[in-house]
Amino acid sequence: MEHPQIIQGGMGIAVSDWRLAHAVAREGAMGVVSGTAISSVLARRLQLGDIGGHMRRALEHFPVPEIAEEVLNTYYRSGGKGADEPYKLAPMFKIKTSLAGLRLTVAANFTEVFLAKEGHDGKVGINFLEKIQLPHLASIYGAMLAGVNYVLMGAGIPRQIPGVLDSLSQHLKSRYKLAVENEPRDEETYTEFDPAEVIGLPSDFPLSRPCFIAIIASATLALSLSKKASGHVDGFVIEYPVAGGHNAPPRGKLQLTERGEPIYGPKDDVDLEKIAAIGRPFWLAGGYADPDRLVRAMELGATGIQVGSAFSLCEESGVDAALKQRALDSVKQNGIRVYTDATASPTGFPFKVLPLEDTASELPVYENRPRICDLGYLRVLAKSGDDKILYRCASEPIADYVKKGGEEATATGCKCLCNALLANVGQAQLQKSGFTETPLLTSGDDINMVTRFLSGGSTSYKAKQVLDFLRAPTKFDEAAAGDGEAQPLGSPARKPFEAGSSNDATNNAC
């Protein structure tokens, strides 16, 4: 299979939505939809009246009409809910999620991928976070029902996913081992998903196993996944800490700058020579949104690059229109310095924040938010002293978090990314307290490069402009790199090398 040279990054909750992925895939790159919290996204789009009718059109193609009708009957509001009404919440995920919750998740992932693939033969992928484990099985199955071409996953070690793709492509009951804090080593906790029980399609319903690409930040992890994953890993995205969203924590003891940002050093460099020697496709991400960087990446043995931030504020992205324009105006007028917040995310991973006035990134505004965990996507599982499994999140009320065995210091500074990221895409919840959730935008360090698309008085730009720029004829300027080394923004330099020649394509499931 010939893989696309450019991957559009999977961003946030519905920032990389079906419109953006559709626009990118039509141009021959890989369009990627975000699968994070997609069940809530579909439920809220329907409650807003399904503007344009796209959700209903996709659900008309869902292979089990009764389930599509069930979803519509539960969430669709003709004309949309009132501005002073809260959203009806999607069911929270548990080790044993309700049947309604599982079906909504399958339908939501199907809908997003179906719309991204509609009307063209380009490649479409879906992006998940390994740390959000409970929805994985239902989400992947729904995306596969719509013919997703790639599954991409980072924010953890996705060792189990290749085997899950193998089993679900055959409609087999699948299980996923869950990370449970304080669980004895001789115990294991799993969540399970049986397609026959949840969806009920015949076993001969055609499904294809998508390619699996792991998003990682070290050669060690690439080597481990290539040898020890539950099935075939088809490729890697190598993501540097200048990329947006969640970043891999620095290796070793966490040290902060005077500004409070994590310090990355030589230990965080990636040995691309070792990765290339594995013989599988890989893409470089984080500071590579430039035609010279694309050329250089390929000279270093990469198949291409992954680009997120350059697409994040384009017309087709899912960011709320008013918020997007405010961000573009700020970038164009003043430039923005992205802040890597070491404590913002309940996951414990550093999280990039795009500072804008009146958003959740401004501490005084966010501190006024009542701490509540009503969506639960980032909850972790933990064993209590009486051997019960608890669900806790570092962004819930601190007293509740501590009562469940969490440490107060761990929760300090954490923000509810679930609600904030939904607010980014125009789905802010009105809480019972009267508080309307505020947005929190994320971006890579190189967000200011989007000004190149705003020349001549333009106030917006399209995804095609980004792709045209990245594909522009160019020759890597050795002088610009000093001694000929490729230097992704903010990352340690690495020397050129010849790509490895090993090739295990005979085992490549895609």
Image: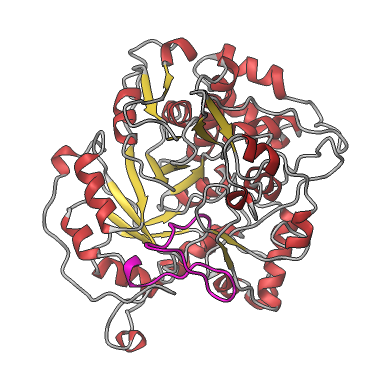
Left or right of 75 in this view: 186: left
Q: Residue furthest front?
A: 385
Q: Residue at x 52, y 51 (%)?
A: 348
Q: Residue furthest left?
A: 502
**Residue 53 visible within the image:** yes
**In the rendered view of the protein, which quadrant contains the N terminus?**
top left
Q: Residue at x 51, y 43 (%)?
A: 33
Horizontal and vertical percent for residue 164?
Answer: 34, 29
Left or right of 120 in this view: 77: right
Horizontal and vertical percent for residue 217?
Answer: 35, 58
Q: Nearer the viewer, residue 308 or 405?
A: 405
User: Relative to residue 200, is residue 499 depicted above or below?
Assistant: below
User: Relative to residue 257, is residue 372 depicted above or below?
Assistant: above
Q: Nearer the viewer, residue 413 or 229?
A: 413
Horizontal and vertical percent for residue 74?
Answer: 70, 19
Is residue 248 found inside the magenta-colored segment of the image?
Answer: yes
**In the rendered view of the protein, which quadrant contains the C terminus?**
top left
Q: Main secondary structure of the magenta part?
A: loop
Q: What span is colored magenta in the figure?
A: 245-268
Is residue 419 found inside the magenta-colored segment of the image?
Answer: no
Q: Nearer the viewer, residue 7 or 162?
A: 162
Horizontal and vertical percent for residue 188?
Answer: 36, 26
| Total numbered circles | 0
User: Relative to residue 351, is residue 82 depicted above or below?
Assistant: above
